[in-house]
Amino acid sequence: YHDCTLYSTLMPCFLCAGAVVQFQIPRVIVGESRTFPGARDFMEAHGVRVIDYDLERCRLMMETFIQEYPDLWYEDIGEK
Ligand SMILES: [Zn+2]
């Protein structure tokens, strides 16, 4: 994975960021991080280059998902 780039709709959580660091993925491209701030600082502290495009399209996708599946979302982020 040393020459891979990971693409994600939103900022990876600490669980996913841990996998990024463990497998030494050097770059993470993120659609947005307003919905969920995730673990950017953790990845950057381990030398991962994180690029956040802050795309409206991704924000709208996440807002729609959260409206339609709030129980799933809040369980997924550990707030339920
Ligand atoms: Zn995750």
Image: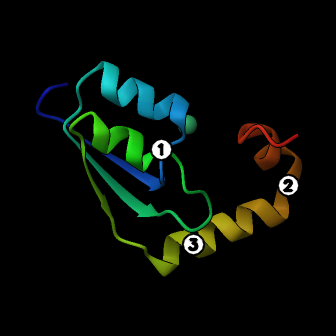
Q: Earlier in the sequence, mark 2 or mark 3?
A: 3
Q: Secondary structure at mark 1?
A: loop
Q: Residues within 10 Å of mark 2 (few under 14, many from 20)?
A: few
Camera-nearest label, 2 or 1: 1
Q: Is mark 2 within 8 Å of ligand 1?
A: no
Residue type highlighted by circle 3? Arg
Residue type highlighted by circle 2? Pro
Q: Which residue occupies 28% across, 20% down?
A: 23
- Vertical order, 9 against 19 (above or below): below
Q: Which residue occupies 56% across, 68% down?
A: 34
Residue type highlighted by circle 1? Ala
Location of the N terminus by quadrant is top left
x and y, in percent, of residue 9 in the image = 47, 57
Residue at mark 3: 59
Q: Secondary structure at mark 3?
A: helix
For the residues marked 2 and 1, what is the alpha-carbon distance in whole angstroms? Answer: 21 Å
Q: Which mark is residue 39?
A: 1
